[in-house]
Amino acid sequence: MRVACVLGPKFEDSEFKQPYDAFREAGHEVTIVGLEAGAQLEGDKGTVKTTVEKSFKDVKPEDFGALLIPGGGSPDKLRAHDEAVKFVKAFMTAGKPVLAICHGPQLLLTADEFKNHKMTAWKTIQGDLKKAGANVVDQEVVVDRNLVTSRQPSDIPAFITESLKLLEHVPARR
């Protein structure tokens, strides 16, 4: 399956790298999508560097079967840009798998795509989501239909396991 990984500056190193590697190892094609193709991005911890492969202007949600939203500072930076928010919203509207960890649900909040899903997130984002009316629980991983969410780096193994299960059971669209 083709997976879009939306990524901006100061992403959480492990929340990007570990799922990215696991999805590729499982045979999925993962494309890093960001604000500017060719931009060099560095994780918040400085241990992971990567390059944006495609800009939001270069791709359409229809090009992908699933979406990965790593946490850290990246989701907050991306949600300030309409093209990123519209891209994320399109996956939720289409019912495609969306895999968001830590601060990732900030993009769902800005896209107004959180009300009909049970989810989790980083503790401060949980509070924001609750105030907005989301059904939030404090668990290492929550799977609700097309949405997989987790809270923090220590949840990555469960996040990867449940994300891969969901990707396996989705009819291949791309």
Image (cartoon, rainbow, N blue to C red):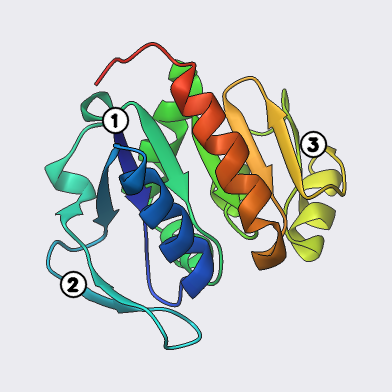
Q: How many marks?
A: 3
82, above or below 45, in the image: above
Query: Which of the marked residues, 1 or 3, is nearer the chain's N terminus?
Result: 1
Q: Residue placed at 47% from the left, 74% from the top?
A: 13
User: Badge 3: few (under 14), some or many (20 or more) residues near its Cα, within 10 Å?
Assistant: many
Closer mark to the observer between disc 2 and disc 3: 2
Instruction: Please give the residue where the numbered disc 1 appears in the rendered image.
Output: 61
Secondary structure beneath dot 2 equals loop
**CA gap, disc 2 to disc 3?**
34 Å
Amino acid type, residue under disc 3 in the picture: Ala
Of residues 158 and 148, the one nearer the viewer is 158
**CA gap, disc 1 to disc 3?**
24 Å
Measuring from the top left, give residue 126's x and y in whole percent: 80, 53
Would residue 152 be found to the left or right of residue 20 on screen? right
Residue 134 is labelled as 3
Measuring from the top left, give residue 85's x and y in whole percent: 43, 44
- Outermost bottom residue: 46
User: Badge 2: few (under 14), some or many (20 or more) residues near its Cα, within 10 Å?
Assistant: some
Residue 39 is labelled as 2
Secondary structure beneath dot 3 equals loop
Q: Residue placed at 55% from the left, 62% from the top?
A: 71
Residues at circles 1 and 3 in contact by the CB criterion of under 8 Å: no
Query: Which of the marked residues, 2 or 1, is nearer the chain's N terminus?
Result: 2
73, above or below 150, in the image: below
Q: Residue placed at 64% from the left, 19% from the top?
A: 145
The quadrant in which the C terminus is found is top left
Q: Residue placed at 32% from the left, 15% from the top?
A: 172
